[in-house]
Amino acid sequence: MADHALLCAAVRDAGALALGYFQTDLKHWDKGKDDPVSEADHAVNDLLHARLQGTRPDYGWLSEETEDDPTRLTCDHVWVIDPIDGTRAFIKGKPHFTICAALVQKGAPVCAAVFNPATDEFFEATRGGGATLNGVPISPSTRDEIAGCRMAAFAPMFKHPAWPEPWPEMEMVDRNSVAYRLVLVANGYVDACLALNRKNDWDLAAADLIVREAGGRITTHDGATLVYNKPFTKHRSLLAAGPNLYNVLFDKVGQITLP
């Protein structure tokens, strides 16, 4: 089975498994400060590891719910996994979570899937092959102005007094899953996504490819390419949008220095 077909089949089965726990009295706890995890996260992680790593034992593995193994840095191919992105929403019974899987080669994702089983939205992409939602090709918004746009982000960020100029009014879209926010950029449901706090490889890798293959742009807020499977797996910030709005947003945030 080809890598992408293997990945998609595993993610679909992982989504079905997650749904078995969704809106039930599942066990959950905090891994650290404000960092929840549930028994479903671990069950989905175990399924994906068995299906992906079990079939491709020479590939590396990087997952939010697996202790990091530095041998991944020596591998040509690495699975990058978030078993349930949006665990907080999942625990609360809100359908704003996704199962995320990407295959990364030389720092860049080459195939990916982001699945929201609660809404039956299956986003996928291969490098050079375009992006689809439930088998139908997708593309981002053509909007070219910030005012009135649909922005997937943390709303209070835009009211911070440090901004040199106030932001225009926007329609804010709240999704706990970062990957879900990004694939909603890819299919044009939202116009842009901005985050000025750190995100991990597993939050971004799968959705990154889907955004780019759909025709959108995704970088750090200051325009740097997102590179995966490095020793340090966090990225300082995130900016994604259709090409027109990306340029406008970059003009506004690209020169900001973050603490």
Image (tube, rainbow, N blue to C red):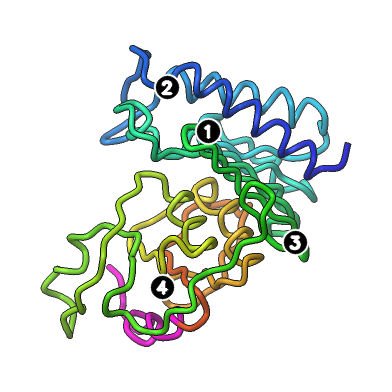
Q: Is 191 positioned to the left or the right of 259 in the image? A: right
Say which residue appears at 30% left-offset and 51% top-offset.
174
Q: Is residue 64 above or below residue 158?
A: above
Q: Residue at x 67, y 60 (%)?
A: 137
Q: Earlier in the sequence, mark 1 or mark 2?
A: 2
**Residue holding disc 4:** 221
Image location (x, y in percent) of residue 85: 46, 39
Which residues are the magenta region? Answer: 245-259
x then y, percent, for residue 142: 49, 78
Task: Give the spatial CA distance, label 1 vs label 4.
Answer: 30 Å
Near-viewer residue (235 or 10): 10
Whichever of labels 3 and 2 marks the residue nearer the N terminus, that label is 2
Q: Secondary structure at mark 4?
A: loop
Q: Which mark is residue 22?
A: 2
Q: Nearer the viewer, mark 3 or mark 2?
A: 2
Q: Secondary structure at mark 2?
A: loop
Label 2 CA crowd tier, 10 Å (few <14, some 14–19, many 20+): some
Q: Residue at x 61, y 49 (%)?
A: 123
The amino acid type found where label 1 is placed reads Pro
Question: Which callout, 1 or 4, points at the residue further toward the start of the chain?
Answer: 1
Instruction: Give the left or right position of residue 118, taking residue 81 as reference.
Output: left
Q: Quadrant of residue 252?
A: bottom left
Q: Which residue is mark 1?
A: 117
Q: Main secondary structure of the magenta part?
A: helix
